[in-house]
Amino acid sequence: MILFGSKLGEGGNVPLLLKFLLPAIAGGLSASVTMYGVVYSQTKAPDTNPASQPILVYGDQS
Amino acid sequence: MERPSVRRSALLLDAWPLLLAVVLCLPLLAHGGYPLARDLVFVPHQPWTLASVGLGDGAPRAVPLDAVVSLLTSVVDGGWLARVVIPLILATAGWGTHRLVRDLGTVARLTAGGFAVWNPYVVERLALGQWALLAGYAAVPWLLVAARRYRESGTPGDLGGTVAWLGLASLTPTGGVLGSLAVLAGGAGRSVRTAWLVLVCVLLQLPWLVPSVVGAAASTSDPAGVDAFSAGSEGPGGVLTALVGLGGIWDANSVPGTRDSWWSTLTAVLVVVAVVLGWRTLCRVRGRDDTVRLAGLAGVGLTLAFLSSVPGGDELVRRLVDTVPGAGLLRDSQKFLAPLVVLAAVSFAASAHRVVEAARRHGTEVVLAVGLVAVPLPFLLVPDGAATVWPTVRPVTYPAGLDRVAAILDDGPPDATLATLPWRSYRGFGWGNGLISSDPATRWFDLDVLASDDLQVGPTTIRGESPRGQALGRALRTGPAADALRAGHVTWALVYLDDPDAPQLDLSGLTPAYSDADLALYRVPGTTPPAASAGTTARVVTGLADGLALVLVAGAAILAARRRRKAARTSAG
C-alpha cells in the first residue's frame, strides 16, 4: 500500500514492529488526551458558586 | 492538468476546516429555530431602521453589519442565513490560513487550516456569540495574501482583491481595524501603492466612523469598561500567558474548562516553541520579509491586547476611551489577538512540516504517526472547544407573540418608539436556551426600539452611550413607568413577563394592547413623537458613506473576479 508517496514498511532504521505500532500509539495518545480534556472540563467544579452570582449579567471577569 | 492525487489533496485541505466548523456549529445545524445567546442574535427578518446604519440612539457597534444582515434577511430567512454564514466564516479562516503556507506538505497545511478554525480565540469569541468579529479574523490571512500581491504587482485587480476581503473584515468596527492593520502590514511598500491602501482602509471604515461622529450616541465610552473588558488570566500563568496561549477573553463564562488549568500554560509554551521552530521554514516558504510583517502584525495585536492589563497601560487606555471618539474599541482588548492566532497556526504548520521531513526518512508509518498528532492539534489544545461553543449556538424558538406584537406596531403611529421592560440590556428568557442574550426586540421590530445599553459585568455596571436610553433608565428608576415613558417620548412598552423583575413593574397608567404568556404590549397614553435621532445632514452623509463603501466593495469584487479568471486562463494555457 502506498501512503505519503512510499510503500508501507519501507525505509529508515526503526524496527518494523515499532513502525507499525507508532501510528496506533500516536492516534491513541491524541484520542486519550482529547477524551481526558473533555471529561475534565465537563466534571470540574465551577470557580465560584453559581448561586452567589447575579443571574442577568452580560458576563463575568475571568 | 492536475493529477488526481493533487485534486484529492486540495479537496482534503478545504474539507478539514469545513468539517471542524460544522462540528463547532453542530447544534445550530441539527436543530430548528434561531440562534439567540449572548451577542449572537438572528431574527427571521431584520427590518432596515436608522439603527441599522448607526443612526439610532445607541453607539454604532454592529455597523454596517446590521445593515448587511437586514438586506440579506429580506431575501433569506435569518435562521438559514446563520446556518450558512457562521460555519462558512469559520471555514474561511482555515481555508485562508492553509493557503498562507501553500508550499508546505499536506500534513502541515491540514495543521494550519484546522488550527485556524478550532483554537482558544475562536472558541472563546464564538462562545460569547461574536460571530461577526470572527469574520474580521477570517479575513486576515486572505488580506495578507491579497495585499502582498498588490504590493508586488500594483494592478487594479489585486487592489480589488484586497478591498473585497477588507469589506468582509469591516462588517464590524473592530474587524475593520484588524483588517486595515493586516492590509498595511501585508501591503505597505512603495509610496503610491501604500497611499491607495491607506485610502481604501479609511473609506471602508466610514460606515461606522461617520455615524459615530454625526449620530445621537455619545462618541466616547465609559472608561469603567477598560478594567471590566481587559484580558483575563486563564490557568496558572497570568494574563500574558493566557494571551500568548491565544485565549484571555475577559468573560469567564466563555472560557473552556481546560483553559483554567495547565492546558492554557502548555498552549502558550507550544505557541512560542512553534514560532521559534517554524521560523526558518516560514521564512523559506513565505519569504523573510512577509514572515517578519506577519510577526510584526501579531506583535502589535498582542501589545494592544495586553496594554490594558499593565500598570500605566490601563490608565492610557482609560484616558483614550474617555476622550477620543471611537477609542471605546480598545476596551475589549483581547479581540486584537487575531493576527497572533494566524501566526501561531502557520508556525504550527511549519513546525509540523519540519518534523514530517525528519520523520520521512524513517518510513511512511512514522510520518503517519506525526500526522496523527499534528492534524488533531486543535482537539489536543482545546479538547472542550465544542462543549464550550455548543450552548451558545443552540437555537431557540421565538414566541409567536413577537409577530403579533409586530403586527400591532405596524398599524400604530409613525415615528413611534418602543421600550422594552424591565429595563436591562441582556436578558434570560424562559423560552431561550438557558443563556442570557441581547434583546431580540432591537432587531425584530420596524421602529425605533429603546433598550438599556448599560452592561453589567460581574458587580460593575458599564454605562452605555445612548443619552436617550440613559435618561429613560434614570426616569424608570425613580418614578412610575407611564410617566417615565411619556417623558421619554416612548409610544409603546413591551414587557417580558418571564423576567424576574417583571412582577415589580408599576404599569399603572399604561393601556394594554396585547398579552400572552411571554409578552405584554402597552400603549403609553398622551405621548408625543421624539425629536429625530438623526437630522437630514446626518442621514445624507451616512448614506453617502455607506453607498461609497458598497460601490467600492462591489466594484472591487468584480475586479478581483476578473483577475482570478484571467489568472486561471493563463495557467490553463
Image (tube, coloured by chain):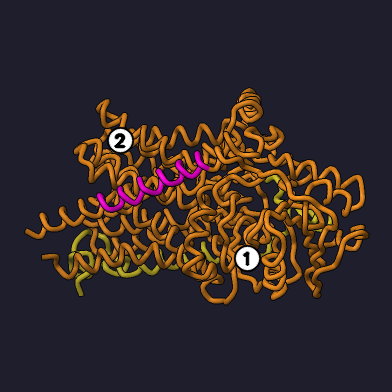
Chain colours: A yellow, B orange
Alpha-carbon neighbours of circle 2 within 10 Å: few (<14), some, or many (≥20)? many
The answer to which quarter of the image holds residue B238 is: top right
Alpha-carbon neighbours of circle 1 within 10 Å: few (<14), some, or many (≥20)? some
Q: Assess whether residue B428 is covered by the magenta stretch.
A: no
Which residue range is magenta in the image? B540-560
Residue at 52% x, 57% y: name it.
B382
Q: Main secondary structure of the magenta part?
A: helix
B448 with respect to B262 (left or right): right
Residue at 65% x, 62% y: name it.
B445
The amino acid marked with disc number 2 is Gly
Q: Does residue B238 appear in the picture of this structure?
A: no
Residue placed furthest toward the left? B573
Please count the marks in the image. 2
Q: Residue B374, position in %: x, y?
A: 38, 57
**Along the line of sight, which residue is nearer the eye, B324 or B37?**
B324
Residue at 19% x, 62% y: name it.
A11
Q: Assess whether residue B553 is covered by the magenta stretch.
A: yes
Q: Quadrant of the N terminus of chain B?
A: bottom left
The residue to which callout 1 is attached is B391
Q: Residue B13, position in %: x, y?
A: 31, 62
Q: Quadrant of the C terminus of chain B?
A: bottom left
Q: Residue B401, position in %: x, y?
A: 72, 73
The residue to which callout 2 is attached is B187
Please say if B394 is above or below B119. below
What subunit carries mark 2? B
**Along the line of sight, which residue is nearer the eye, B455 or B385?**
B455
Q: Residue B522, position in %: x, y?
A: 82, 63
Q: Secondary structure at mark 2?
A: helix
Dot 2 or dot 1: first in sequence order is: 2
What subunit carries mark 1? B
The answer to which quarter of the image holds residue B44 is: bottom right
